[in-house]
Amino acid sequence: MPEEIKGIVKPPYEMPPEKLERQDAPVGGNLPPMVRMFTWICFARAGLDFLFAFILGVAPDSAISVYLATTFGSRFEHIPAEVMFLIFGFLFAFIGWRWYARDWRARWIAMFLSGAAAARTMVLIVADKLPSDHGQVLSVDMQMELIANVGLNLLICGYLAFYPGMAQAFKETPWD
């Protein structure tokens, strides 16, 4: 038995075990639904990217490899599609892992990126409305698509910032 410190009085009753566990950390069904969905989307995307890289590595001249490389792997012309699939596979696996671990930095980064994308798109829409010498104006369909993009990004940012239980799901400090 450890030495007792003078002036510290032990409580008269033992603390119940259910009170010793953290009650505010959501587990299982208490996790916000979009957090769980986004996490699994990241893992599925990582798995597809790794599968596509494997297909390109095993049979680089097959019809499916050519289709995958031209359809999904042409993000950057100077980097081979197989390397791009590997890079994005590791990137999405890392993002999914950080969301699965409920890292608060992942939440704040996602909020920033969605808010910044919305702000950037709004600036581009406003800049397109200004008179210019180039004469190129976005069509109505393109403007509606951009406005929908702004709305979706603001919805994501607002969800991550204000949805009930989100602050508890991504605790910044373990002692809160």
Image (cartoon, grey):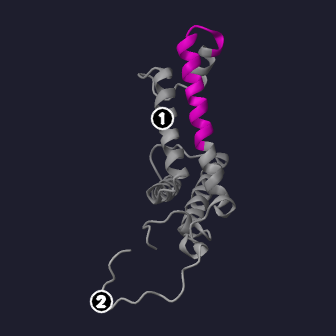
Mark number for residue 6?
2
Residue drawn at x 65%, y 50% as measured from the top left = 37
Check the image and report above or below for 102 versus 137.
Answer: below
Q: What type of secondary structure mainly makes up the magenta span?
A: helix
Instruction: Name the secondary structure under disc 1.
Output: helix
Circle on res. 23: none
- Answer left or right for 28 relative to 112: right
Structural distance between the alpha carbons of marks 1 and 2: 55 Å
Q: Magenta stretch: residue 47 in it?
A: yes
Residue 101 placed where, x, y %?
51, 53
- Magenta highlight on residue 167: no
Disc nearest the viewer among 1 and 2 = 2
Which image quadrant is residue 152 in? bottom right
x%, y% of residue 111? 50, 59
Give the residue type that dot 1 points to. Answer: Phe
As drawn, the residue found furthest toward the top would be 61
Say which quarter of the image contains residue 20.
bottom right
Seen at 59% across and 23% down, the residue is 52
Which mark, by number, is residue 90? 1
Note whether residue 70 is visible: no
The residue that appears at 46% across and 60% down in the rendered structure is: 104
x and y percentages locating residue 53 in the rendered image: 54, 22
| x, y percent for residue 90 | 48, 35
Please tell me which of labels 1 and 2 falls first in the chain: 2
